[in-house]
């Protein structure tokens, strides 16, 4: 059974010569699985994720023939019901915690704010849940981190804190927008392992938005490839190396590997992409 169903999703913004579409009628479904959405910057990946959570305000315009989450029509829900849904059953991890965390609030207070809005727990119960959430993302001294401000933690720990904030209510759907782009390679693996463990343990659906094809192939079940606002290829993650579309093949060919000896990486030949 599908957790999320998207049909003919379009996102546009006004321009000097009329509306400019940045997402051009895409359709896909998500079960309780890990779905990767990949593509270059500007391909429409993040706009897709934000549209699902109704985070695109005017003058942006979002339309869809169908945008349904677990039986709820997201296109017709009131703003009040949508706010209640976000954070509780649907959440989004942004790509850089430096810009997502409030710099003048302590870490613990920021995470507890989610519980204040979506639950009836008292202060002691909220604190206990926050500490448990920090432990769940493998922070070894949650009592100390609870009292810190965002500028006092590293980028990797900041990203773990963001994940703790998004999963504290165990949502059914989590969208992670470039969750590892600001992290070094060793910390990237740790953060992805944490998310993978949470998906396995809670059974939620996960959408990872990224430009890193190899990372998505390792951690996801299925992959959608976006180019110029459209989905140009859909495949099982294990079959990514056998991609058929010229754009996907070009992205794979331009990805360096540690054991290669090419003098120059090939440049994506966009003349092969036709009208896409």
Image (tube, helix red, strand yellow):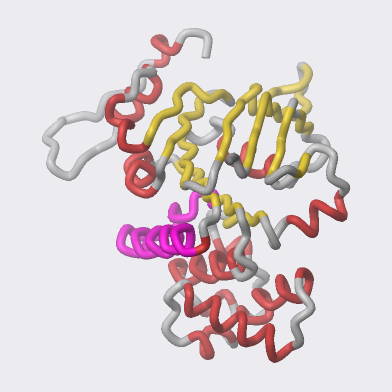
Q: Eyeballing the image, is 96 above or below 207?
A: below
What residue is shown at x 50% (from left), y 65% (from top)? 159
Where is residue 36 shown, x and y percent of the image? 46, 41
User: Quick one: 199 or 60, which is closer to the camera?
Assistant: 199
Say how many tags the image has.
0
Image-quadrant location for residue 6? top right
What residue is shown at x 71% (from left), y 39% (from top)? 68
What residue is shown at x 74% (from left), y 88% (from top)? 123
Image-quadrant location for residue 264? top left
Magenta highlight: main SS: helix
What residue is shown at x 68% (from left), y 83% (from top)? 126
Q: Residue furthest front?
A: 1
Where is residue 104 shown, x and y percent of the image? 69, 77
Asked if residue 178 is among those painted magenta in the image, a careful observer would answer: yes
- Lateral position of residue 32 relative to residue 27, left or right: left
Q: Eyeballing the image, is 88 above or below 70?
A: below
User: Quick one: 11 or 91, which is closer to the camera?
Assistant: 91
Where is residue 269 shown, x and y percent of the image? 36, 16
User: Quick one: 125 or 213, which is closer to the camera?
Assistant: 125
Q: Quadrant of the N terminus?
A: top right
Q: Which span of residues is magenta-colored?
A: 176-201
Where is residue 140 shown, x and y percent of the image? 42, 83
- Lateral position of residue 76 relative to residue 71, left or right: right
- Lateral position of residue 225 relative to residue 243, left or right: right
């Amino acid at each position: 059974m599908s957790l999320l169903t998207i049909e003919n999703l379009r996102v546009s913004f006004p321009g000097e010569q009329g509306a400019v579409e940045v997402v051009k009628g895409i359709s896909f479904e998500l079960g309780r699985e890990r779905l990767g959405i990949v593509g270059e910057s500007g391909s429409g990946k993040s706009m897709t994720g934000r549209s699902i959570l109704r985070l695109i305000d005017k003058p942006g315009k979002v339309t869809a023939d169908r945008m349904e989450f677990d039986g709820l029509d997201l296109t017709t829900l009131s703003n009040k019901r949508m706010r209640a849904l976000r954070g509780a059953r649907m959440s989004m991890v942004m790509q850089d915690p430096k810009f997502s965390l409030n710099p003048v609030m302590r870490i613990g207070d920021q995470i507890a704010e989610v519980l204040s809005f979506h639950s009836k727990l008292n202060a002691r119960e909220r604190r206990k849940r926050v500490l448990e959430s920090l432990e769940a993302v493998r922070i070894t001294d949650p009592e100390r981190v609870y009292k810190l401000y965002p500028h006092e933690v590293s980028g990797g720990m900041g990203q773990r804190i963001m994940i703790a904030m998004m999963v504290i209510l165990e949502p059914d759907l989590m969208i992670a927008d470039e969750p590892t782009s600001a992290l070094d390679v060793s910390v990237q693996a740790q953060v992805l392992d944490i998310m993978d463990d949470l998906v396995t343990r809670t059974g939620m659906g996960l959408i990872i938005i990224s430009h890193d094809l190899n990372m998505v192939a390792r951690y996801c079940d299925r992959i959608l490839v976006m180019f110029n606002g459209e989905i140009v290829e859909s495949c099982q993650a294990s079959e990514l190396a056998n991609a058929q579309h010229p754009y996907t093949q070009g992205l794979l060919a331009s990805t360096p590997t540690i054991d290669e000896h090419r003098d120059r990486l090939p440049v994506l030949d966009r003349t092969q992409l036709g009208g896409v």
